[in-house]
Structure formats: structure tokens, C-alpha cells
């Protein structure tokens, strides 16, 4: 089963943040694949550029690390 996660859940999982609810972590651990939309990476970029969010890696590194850690990136198609 694929699980599509939103931007906050992705960030919390990516950073191993304690704000990720245990129930969500268990659910993600049981799934076959975790999917994150490319739009989440856009959102991270926008929030970082406006100062609303601090991420110490550039977006390309974040995406590479996400794929390396088993996240699938969902493209936007028309």
C-alpha cells in the first residue's frame, strides 16, 4: 500500500522530529512505500526563501536524500 504524506509529515519524518505522532510513524512503517508530492518540495523551497522555515540542506540534496531513504516522489502531471 502506498501512503501519500503531506509536507509537515515529510519534514518531521525526514528530520526524525518528535512532532511526528507515533501512530503516524507506525502507519508509515507498515506501508510498502511512502509517497511525497513534488509540491511539498516547492512548499519547502517557498517557505525557506521567505524565512518561514529553516532547512539547512538545499532542495536538491533534500530530494536526493528522500529518495535514498525510500520516499517516492510523486510528480505533477496534467
Image (tube, rainbow, N blue to C red):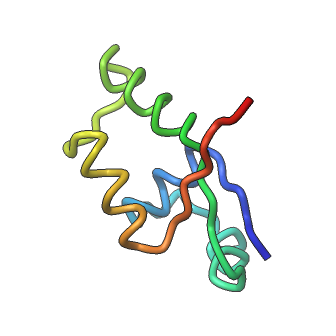
In this picture, is 64 found above or below 24?
above
Question: x%, y% of residue 48?
Answer: 33, 26
Q: Which residue is painted at 28% across and 34% down in the image?
A: 54
Q: Which residue is painted at 46% across and 38% down in the image?
A: 41
User: Which of the two residues, 23 or 14, is positioned nearer the viewer here?
Assistant: 14
Hey, which quadrant is residue 35 in on the image? bottom right
Q: Which residue is painted at 30% across and 18% down in the image?
A: 49
Where the C terminus falls, by quadrant? top right
In this picture, is 13 found above or below 59?
below
Where the N terminus falls, by quadrant? bottom right
Question: x%, y% of residue 52?
Answer: 38, 22
Q: Residue furthest front?
A: 78
Q: Which residue is painted at 62% across and 67% down in the image?
A: 34
User: Which of the two residues, 72 or 5, is positioned nearer the viewer here?
Assistant: 72
User: Which of the two residues, 4 or 25, is positioned nearer the viewer here?
Assistant: 4
In this picture, is 24 found above or below 29?
above
Question: x%, y% of residue 45?
Answer: 37, 28
Hey, which quadrant is residue 40 in on the image? top right
Q: Is residue 13 left or right of residue 30?
A: left
Amino acid at each position: 500500500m502506498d501512503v501519500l504524506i503531506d509536507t509537515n509529515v515529510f519534514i518531521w519524518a525526514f528530520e526524525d522530529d518528535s512532532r511526528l505522532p507515533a501512530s503516524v510513524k507506525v502507519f508509515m512503517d507498515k506501508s510498502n512505500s511512502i509517497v511525497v508530492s513534488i509540491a511539498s518540495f516547492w512548499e519547502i523551497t517557498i517557505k525557506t526563501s521567505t524565512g518561514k522555515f529553516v532547512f539547512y540542506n538545499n532542495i536538491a540534496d533534500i530530494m536526493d536524500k528522500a529518495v535514498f531513504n525510500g520516499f517516492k516522489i510523486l510528480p505533477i502531471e496534467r
